Amino acid sequence: MFFRRRGKRKSPTAETIADARDMLDSEVAAGFDPPEEIITSILECYEHEADPAALRPHLETHLHDALAAHRAAQASWPETTDCDRLDAAFAELESRGILARQNYWCCGTCGCAAIDEEMSEAGPQARGYTFYHEQDTESAVEGHGLYLNYGAADHEAGPEAAVEIGEEIRGTLEHHGLQVDWDGTVEKRIGVALDWKRRAPQPG
């Protein structure tokens, strides 16, 4: 989830219920977590602010409605969405030795630490990485586009190696029909302008 709430454990107020529903809507639109995990994560975020047992029924009812509305909206979506293009681009990068992760960890700091560990475990076949974290997902859902972290596996190779990986990422994204905004320097993350439409997983 995107952030943790603080406060007293108590029966949920109308404001708490409304805020939790907004968070749920964002998670449904993000399209990564299964329904029960969405409920559990939101309850954890509000556990100091509201009694989870009292808040859960409100979330379960709203989740049912939110998923139904999301699946109904999908009927008017194009056959291939920007999220589909992003999936295809990340899969291609992965096949070429660039670890590509979506909705990866809570923030850039944690994501960088985790991807370094993944690259160490992957060995020499991992040439570099790209990822966006949960806060980036939230921003993209809200219509602000996406920003990607990236880098080379060999940190001692200098910024030129990271820029080479960045250029490969940019080319792959553009090949799959996505618009990229990046100045070609390590000082700037790779921006991707996209209309966030990620299909809900089919019910089991």
Image: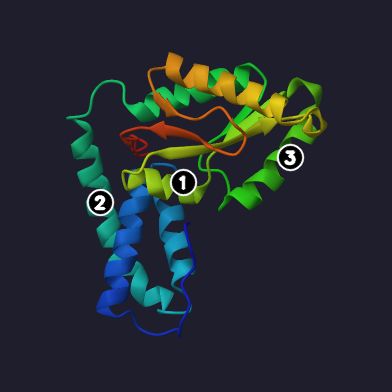
Mark 1 or mark 2, which is nearer the start of the sequence? 2
**Residue occupying the far top of the picture:** 175
Query: Tags 2 and 1 in contact by the CB under 8 Å rule?
Result: no
Between label 2 and label 1, give the one nearer the viewer.
1
Q: Which residue is mark 3?
A: 116
Q: Which residue is mark 2?
A: 66
**Residue at 43% in and 39% down:** 146
Between 35 and 120, the one lying in front of the other is 120
Point out residue 51 in the picture as x, y percentages from the top left corner. Answer: 41, 79
Mark 2 → mark 3, Cα distance in angstroms: 36 Å
Q: Is residue 108 left or right of residue 5?
A: right
Between 187 and 93, the one lying in front of the other is 187
Query: Tags 2 and 3 in contact by the CB under 8 Å rule?
Result: no
**Residue at 32% in and 74% down:** 16
Q: Secondary structure at mark 2?
A: helix
Point out residue 73 in the picture as x, y percentages from the top left corner. Answer: 19, 37
Mark 3 or mark 2, which is nearer the start of the sequence? 2
Numbered badge on residue 88: none
Crowding at mark 1 (Cα within 10 Å: few <14, some 14-19, many 20+): many
Point out residue 200 in the picture as x, y percentages from the top left corner. Answer: 34, 38
Mark 3 or mark 1, which is nearer the start of the sequence? 3
Q: Secondary structure at mark 3?
A: helix
Q: Amino acid at mark 3?
A: Asp
Q: Amino acid at mark 1?
A: Asp
Q: Is residue 83 visible?
A: yes
Q: Amino acid at mark 2?
A: Ala
Mark 1 → mark 3, Cα distance in angstroms: 19 Å
Q: Which residue is mark 1?
A: 136
Point out residue 111 in the picture as x, y percentages from the top left corner. Answer: 63, 46
**Residue at 39% in and 48% down:** 139
Query: Tags 1 and 3 in contact by the CB under 8 Å rule?
Result: no
Mark 2 → mark 1, Cα distance in angstroms: 22 Å
